[in-house]
Image (cartoon, rainbow, N blue to C red):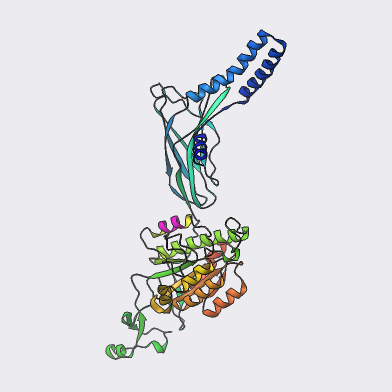
Amino acid sequence: MANAEWYTRLAARFATRLTLRGAVFLAVGVVLFTNAVLVNSRDMLFVASLLIMAPLVAAAYVSLRPARVEVSRVFRPPIVPVGGESMVSLQLHNLSAAPLGGASWCDTPSPGIDTPPVALLPLVSRNGVAGESVHLEYSVVPRHRGVYDVGPLRVFRQDPFGFANSDRNAGSPHDLIVTPRVTRLPGSGLAQSSNDGSIRELVRQATPTSDELIAREYRPGDALRRVNWPATARHGEIMVRQEEQRSNPEARIVLDTTLAGAAGLGAGHVPPHLLAAFELEIELAASVGVHLLDAGYRLEVIELGASQLLPGDQQTLGGLHGDVPATFRAPGGDRALLEALASVIPVPWPSRSARLAAERRVPVRAALRGAQPVLPTFALLVSVSEADVDGLVALARHCEPAVAFVQRTVGAPARERLQGAGWRCVELASADDLEEAWNDVSGERGASHD
């Protein structure tokens, strides 16, 4: 096995093969050589030997004089959104004594990235007139999020007669990070309508404590139940209670990464419609997360599957069953979130034994009994299991508001249970619906008409 792996790596790094011309010469030479032996013709044997030796000598020539090139690769920018453009800058240094006249090159990306076809390499000589290095540049426009390997560079060299060429890899792969597309959402954070009809902005608000209540003058429309009688007596005018805005607001996103509707199908067998829904979920997570971070929120992201945003050996049960959620905050939190979401994939649903073990984990149960603060929470759901619905139902009392963006792949029983627990289920079919849905759940539409 070790020898086979070594041979595979060697073949991937360096290969010599005959061109069509060389193969034709070799085949004709073999035929003539056979006929020469049969008819005992020395002249034909001499010609056949030349035809056979020419491609073999050419193959030896390109094998013994390979194109040895040192490559440095830079992406500008190294992190690009889906559909964005990144320039790939290559600096080649010739390590051979002879110039690389007639050599060709191409880059070798992983699937999902398109690079230019094979092209001629400008003349490069270590000590020659052309100089020691050459600069190459091309652009890529990725169509799907992910972390892609670009490289190594492949350099092809051919003998002067075109009988054989060598194919050698130069340099090492470099990562190009393609982040999810972000839909800019309206407003500056969150807003919601209170029962008395007034609009309160939640850009700086989480759940206030009694010490954070302040008094202000009465305004038309304020509910009488909010009258602060001690402050009214002190000021000689009607004063009402108002929650003071907090300087460190927090919000929560719940990310469905298990695709429980595909449980049992095995890795690589997730139905296409669930994969499409999962990609939409990641785009929604990026849009909502960046919006909240830009508004000044500290963002907590709970994954229903094994942690990928904050990986670890013990992070295997999901955020509702024991894993520590990932947190992001400004400045820089938006970039960190997008980079993390670039590589998130559907993960296998934990086994029943793992779920039962999670039930006995004290920190989660304690948290759901009240240790967590009440936070604005947005659950992005594709196909949840009954166990995850149980966790979301328990989490609902720690959420204000509790909004679940569900796709059509979420079953009706799960929706009914979530709505019964206090979740507001908003169906989304595409990213184009996100702006309108966000206006409804955040209260921006109501605020604009107040």
Q: Nearer the viewer, residue 207 or 95?
A: 95
Number of numbered markers: 0
The residue that appears at 61% across and 18% down in the rendered structure is 52
Q: Would residue 271 be found to the left or right of residue 100 on screen?
A: right
Q: Residue at x 54, y 43 (%)?
A: 114
Towards the viewer: 114 or 390:
390
Q: Nearer the viewer, residue 168 or 187?
A: 168
Determine whether, in the image, residue 261 is placed left or right of residue 360: right
Q: Residue at x 33, y 91 (%)?
A: 229
Most frequent secondary structure within the magenta stretch:
helix
Residue 435 seen in this snapshot? yes
Q: Residue at point 50% right, 56% down?
A: 181
Q: Residue furthest right?
A: 39
Q: Position of residue 117 (x, y in %)?
A: 55, 36
Q: Position of residue 406 (x, y in %)?
A: 56, 69
Asked whether residue 450 is in view, the answer is: no
Q: Nearer the viewer, residue 287 or 232?
A: 287
In the rendered image, residue 385 lying in the magenta stretch gets the answer no
- The quadrant holding residue 23 is top right
Residue 336 part of the magenta segment? yes
Residue 353's x, y, as percent? Answer: 51, 69
Query: In the picture, residue 126 is in which quadrant?
Result: top left
- Vertical position of residue 391 compared to residue 175: above or below: below
Q: Which residues are magenta?
A: 335-340
Residue 355 rendering spot, x and y as whole percentages = 50, 70
Vertical placement of residue 92 versus 355, above or below: above
